[in-house]
Amino acid sequence: LPSDHAVGEFTFAEPPASPGMMRFSAHLVLFLRFLGIVDGQSGNQETDLAGSPNEFSEHQDLVNKILQVYIIHLMDTEQHDLIPVYAAHLRDTSLDLTYMIFLDEMMKYSLIEQQKCYSLACRYLGESVPRLVCKYAAKTMQEGRGSIEDGAEHRANACLWLCYEETMYHSALTHTLALCRDFALGGRKCYEAASTLLLQVLPDNFWKWLAALKFEASHADVNRMDMYENDTRDFLSAAQELEDWRDWYDFQDALRKWKGLHQVMVQQQVKPGSPSVSSPTRAESIQSTGEKLIDHALRLLTRQWLQMPEDAEADGHFPIPPAVVRLTCQPVHKPAGQEGIGFTAAEPAGTFNPEALESALQRELLAASSASTGGQHQPPPPTYVARVAGLVETDRVEISVQKAETGAPSSLEALEQVAYAVGWAIKGNLSQDLQDIGLNVQHLDCGESQTMCRMICRQVCLSKLVLQCIYVRHVLSSLPGGAASKKGHNLVETVVETRAGGDTATATPDSVASTKLRLTQYLTPFQCQELVLMEREATINELDNSDKE
């Protein structure tokens, strides 16, 4: 079947010439360039204003177009070994455009084929390879394909191009962190893609490299060691954040599997004539695993998850970029109940008004500015302003939050207020009109502010974690055959109370209520309602079990 590719100005649904003619034309223009007839060594050379040979001259355009057409033919006929040979003769702009298509095509092939392609690219393209693969990974992460959920696995697998040699591992670390943040603000398929990224895409050598550098950096003078963009502390923070995300996604993966086992047990119980031989054993297994899940969740809740030391030190000397937050997302219908499990029924919202979201964000940011000034009679101008715009020819919107020109100086408190407002927008709780609409995030970009990214992720993820924990507790309280458990019975007390005292490092999961957690700041009113309802049902189940005993 004929292919349909677009390269530069070319768009063709069938080859423009026979394979032999395309090959002859490519070799002809390369030979003419070698003789100096094309690139300016003849008397008819074309130069720019500075007198240098003009690579965008009419002749050079023709050379690039002929080479691009032949390279597309090589892609269609799967002659991958020859592509870097001809691509090396393209100018940089044409090389970037053509190689983005080639790398995308290679995603369909095996790891062996991809590694071979990478080796050949390094041989013929040299120093251009790191730039090309980084550009492709970033492009795939930011643009995506189709729905955000369906394109999540492709975005995770694109990180493979950054993992074929150690010199690219720093880029792989930065890219992986960005993907982990994006996936955490998405739906169920995004969570599965994150597990694929951390467990399958990143090789063992990457984790060994990371562990070795962490050990070296932790024993070095942070003022003298030059290891990660001239700042060892940045590297340590990035490494620690990746470890935090591994812990988070390990829990999410275990919760998915546990939920699937519970659903199988429920289906067997309600199905007429189903065998009951495995019910007690399965219930005990679900009980044991569920209790471990609650312990895991409470450990995440009671330690400083996704909080780096410099986050608390950012106030006063934190460089705030002009565009603090830029969010590309897709409005989706929120599922009824069990909000903490994720957007399991994330159907795109057909009718969505970006102006309503912008107004709600503006009101929240203005209210936060007023509260921070003690509620003066004359409301101060907001520290930050929000803009929401629909993206052309897509079902996505772009949210941007910028520092207001007339607002108060930025501070750590102001960053927290922005994260609070953006987090509520993602969870669909900014206003009554938007309470049934959530946002599946494709890409979160906070510029240089890593602290801002972590704040937004904490605002969304910790509230989800609380609801997931109470969901597990509710299931455990309803298990049949004496397998019911009271594990996590003090969760609501843990969330509501913020008493000082206790050490989160030594506290046990059942005594974490004595620590200062401040978890209520992450819950919206709707989430609080869901938390209380599931706790009520779990308590009723426990009372029923006590009566039966």
Image (tube, grey):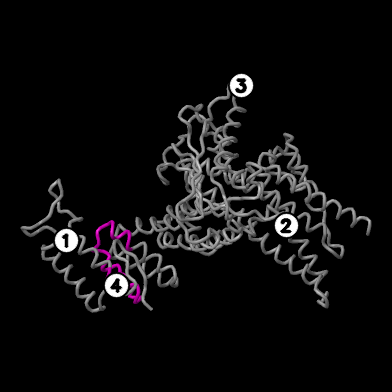
Callout in the foreground (2, 1): 1
The residue where tag 3 is placed is 376
Which of marks 3 and 2 precedes in the sequence? Answer: 2
The residue that appears at 73% across and 53% down in the rendered structure is 294
- Residues packed near mark 1 inside 10 Å, few (<14), some (14 to 19) or many (20 plus): some
Residue 175 percent across, percent down from the top left: 46, 53
Label 3 is placed on what type of residue?
Gln
Q: Secondary structure at mark 3?
A: loop
Vertically, is 228 above or below 30?
Answer: above
Callout in the foreground (4, 1): 1
Report the Cα–Cα distance between label 2 and label 3: 49 Å
Name the dominant secondary structure of the magenta segment: helix
The answer to which of 218 and 106 lies nearer the viewer is 106
- Residues packed near mark 3 inside 10 Å, few (<14), some (14 to 19) or many (20 plus): few
Callout in the foreground (2, 3): 3
The residue where tag 1 is placed is 59
* Magenta-drawn stretch contains 87: yes
Query: What's the mark number on residue 292?
Result: 2
Vertically, is 522 above or below 200?
Answer: above
In the image, which residues are magenta? 69-98
Report the Cα–Cα distance between label 4 and label 1: 24 Å
- 96 horizontally vs 406: left or right: left
Residue 371 percent across, percent down from the top left: 62, 28
Query: What's the mark number on residue 82?
Result: 4
The residue that appears at 71% across and 45% down in the rendered structure is 526
Label 2 is placed on what type of residue?
Lys
Label 1 is placed on what type of residue?
His
Report the Cα–Cα distance between label 2 and label 1: 68 Å
